[in-house]
Amino acid sequence: MIRFSPIFGLVAPFLMLFSGCTVERAQEQVLAEHANGAKKTSIWVYPDGEILKRNEWYTDGIKELEIPYKDGVPHGDFKRWTGFGDVALLGRYKKGLKDGKWTSLFSDKKVEAYRYYEEDHPVGDWEGWHYNRERAFEEHYDDKGLAVGVWKKWFDNGALEQEGDCHAKWDPKREIVSASDESTYLKRFSKDCHLLEEFTCRNGKLDGKFSLYYESYGEKMDSANCGTGRLRVQGVLGKGATGKDSALIGMVTYYRADGTRMKQEHWNRDGKRDSVWRWFDENGIVVRECDLRVSGVVYGACEGNMSKFCAETSYVGEIGGVLDSSNLAQSVNFEHSIGKYPATIRYFKPGRALLYEEYWRDGKIAESRSFFPDTMGGKLASETFWKDGKRNGIMRNWYASGVLRDSLTYVNGERVGEQFSYDTTGKLTIHKTEAGKNRPVIMHLLGE
């Protein structure tokens, strides 16, 4: 015989009471949509207005992130996913602020980095790894969120990429401030472990002696103990009288890979060229001097060959900016060298036989020409007119024989109007009318 417990009579009224209650549930509200109409941002809200969580979505409907809320601010475990649905970042908010360990992950769930926060600022020792599990970086912070100690970065082959305690230059997006105002340093290395750059810092700024090195010179290095490189440039950086950060101050010396001096510059406290500049041949003999305290001509040397000068720049009085002796073929670099003084630039391009000549007025190029070498007749090869840094007016090119090759018309950098091309005999081969970039071109049929 089956009997029911008397307690059932007590439970039944309780169940009836509970079934009469209304459970309030949060409902989703879409705040923003993607261009394709899919939801982009949504929040889950209770009827009384309390936010439960906020979600972000990719265009294909996969959830990008989820942030729980309490009392109107993020509070609880945070998650972010990739567009494939893999977990990419895990962390936690406490009363609206990042708190504790935050973990970023690769798609295969391997840890990419550990970062630690307290009241939204970084603390402790951060560390990260490459996908192949080689160490990627290490950073250190004190309890106040200030960067401390020596930070390091590594390439994915295990070689050291960067180290130093010049923290303000390492991550400007986070505006890191160093906890020390003492003299610090910053070094960068190549992937094969050659030292590339070495700076002295103060208050997070490049300030003091610096050295730049050649990237590679054949020797094998131990990736666990990167050595020094061959000196390329050496000088001093500082704020100077102008207040500009990291300005060249005093003497700057350039070296060849064999260690011999190639060039010697002098800069004053105003960040301008000063005194006598000298160029040296491979035997250390001065082959050119330029006194920048008076008007004259600045000469630049060919890359790796001091026996030939690849540039000649006239100037009036002092000139400002940087004249790059290792890249003189790029005329854009000369604009800073000329300033606002009328001047002429003559230079050679690597691998090209032509001599190039530019005329500058008010700090801008006005006209450019090129000439064939004497072995090819020495005649004019091209002529171009410029306005505000763009081709403007007639541009002509000639064959070495002196026969016109083409005649083009430019307006504000675009080809406009009649364009003509000729063969080596001077016969017209192409005639077209253009109205600017991405506009119709009218081709004219030529008779036999």
Image (tube, rainbow, N blue to C red):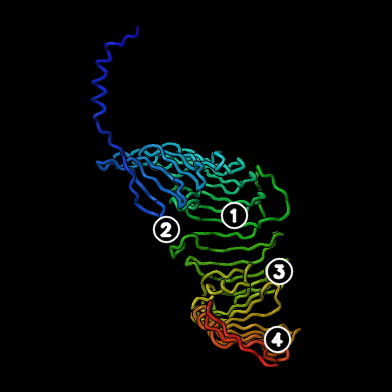
Q: Which of marks 1 and 2 is nearer the N terminus?
A: 2
Instruction: State which mark lies toward you, 1 or 4.
Output: 4
| Mark 3 vs mark 1, CA separation in Å | 23 Å
- Is residue 143 found left or right of 210 in the rendered image? left
Instruction: State which mark lies toward you, 4 or 3.
Output: 4
> Are the two marked residues, 1 and 4, in contact with CB atoms closer than 8 angstroms?
no
- Is residue 320 found left or right of 117 in the rendered image? right
Q: Mark number for residue 197? A: 1
Pinpoint residue 20: horizontal percent, then vertical percent. Answer: 24, 29
User: Which residue carries the number 2 mark?
Assistant: 35
Pinpoint residue 178: horizontal percent, then vertical percent. Answer: 45, 47
| Mark 1 vs mark 2, CA separation in Å | 46 Å
**Residue beneath the point at 73% across and 91% down:** 425
Q: Earlier in the sequence, mark 3 or mark 2?
A: 2
The quarter in which the C terminus is drawn is: bottom right
Circle 2 Cα neighbour tier, 10 Å, few/some/many (<14 / 14–19 / ≥20): few
- Residue type indicated by callout 1: Glu
Front residue (pair 28, 430): 28
Q: Mark number for residue 399? A: 4
User: Which residue carries the number 3 mark?
Assistant: 305
Pinpoint residue 329: horizontal percent, then vertical percent. Answer: 63, 72
